[in-house]
Amino acid sequence: MALDSSAWSSFSADPRSEGELRASDMDRNAVFEILNSALAEGLLDITEHGERLDAAAGLRRLGEAVPLVEDLIRPDGGPPGTGTLVRPELEALDEYSGTPTTPEAIDAAAVELYREDVRKAIVGAATPSLITVLIWAVTCFVAGSLIFFWPAFVILGTGISVITTVSSRSSIIRRRREMLTTRARARLGDPRAQAEIESNPSAFRYEPRSSRAERRARRREIDRRLE
């Protein structure tokens, strides 16, 4: 949504002059859209965005919407080209459609990404450890006696990555949250966030859980749009 005077027309009535009217779901959704656009343009940080969303969810009268959005709406519409549309090729390339945009959803996605990091660290440590233990067991069988348990060095070495991941939970989740916030701003149309992602797409890669067939279909669509 454009953050200009036209934003007031998205309400069922102008909240500045009809503030005593009861707010409807349409009015609450109008506030949500304005706040999301403000987050995309960097007018709000993720914390204040969440606080205002919580307040908007509890709107009872139109007038209560005014303090939540009046400092975000430009009377003259601001400079041109500040819309919130994501370019089609960017939407396909980075799959913005799967990016969460609310603080709660971003937090949940950041925690899920951390859990995926833990799972990957465990699998990465378990595979070589199991292989070396198997080799040790076969060697003991052939020798007919127990030998020094040298796989312990491999287990300790590969286990460091698991320990590091688990002990760095807070910092990893914070970095994941920052990445997802940038993606959310890009999805909502922030050109600076889009440019940041374009400059280093691997650092902002995010793929929601989906089937292999769905991922292949998205990849074909990406290739088609970039031709």
Image (cartoon, rainbow, N blue to C red):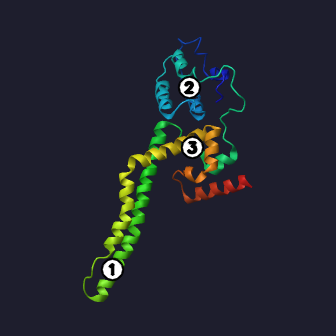
> What residue appears at the point 54 percent right and 30 percent down from the top-left corner?
44
Q: Which-is-in-front pick, marks 3 and 2? A: 3
In terms of depth relative to the viewer, which is nearer, 197 or 55? Answer: 197
Please name the residue that numbered disc 3 is placed on. Answer: 183
Which image quadrant: the N terminus? top right
> What residue appears at the point 37 percent right and 75 percent down from the top-left corner?
132
Q: Residues within 10 Å of mark 3 (few under 14, many from 20)?
A: many
Query: Given the image, on which type of amino acid does mark 1 rest?
Result: Trp
Please name the residue that numbered disc 2 is placed on. Answer: 31
**Taking 211 as reference, is 195 above or below it?**
above
Percent of width and height locating residue 17: 59, 11
Query: Given the image, on which type of amino acid does mark 2 rest?
Result: Val
- Say if mark 1 contacts mark 3, CB within 8 Å: no
- Say if mark 1 contacts mark 2, CB within 8 Å: no
> Which label sits on residue 136?
1
Q: How many marks?
A: 3
Judging from the image, what secondary structure is the residue with disc 1 in?
helix
Q: What residue occupies the far left of the structure in this picture?
A: 145
Q: Which-is-in-front pick, marks 1 and 2? A: 1
Q: What residue occupies the far right of the structure in this picture?
A: 227
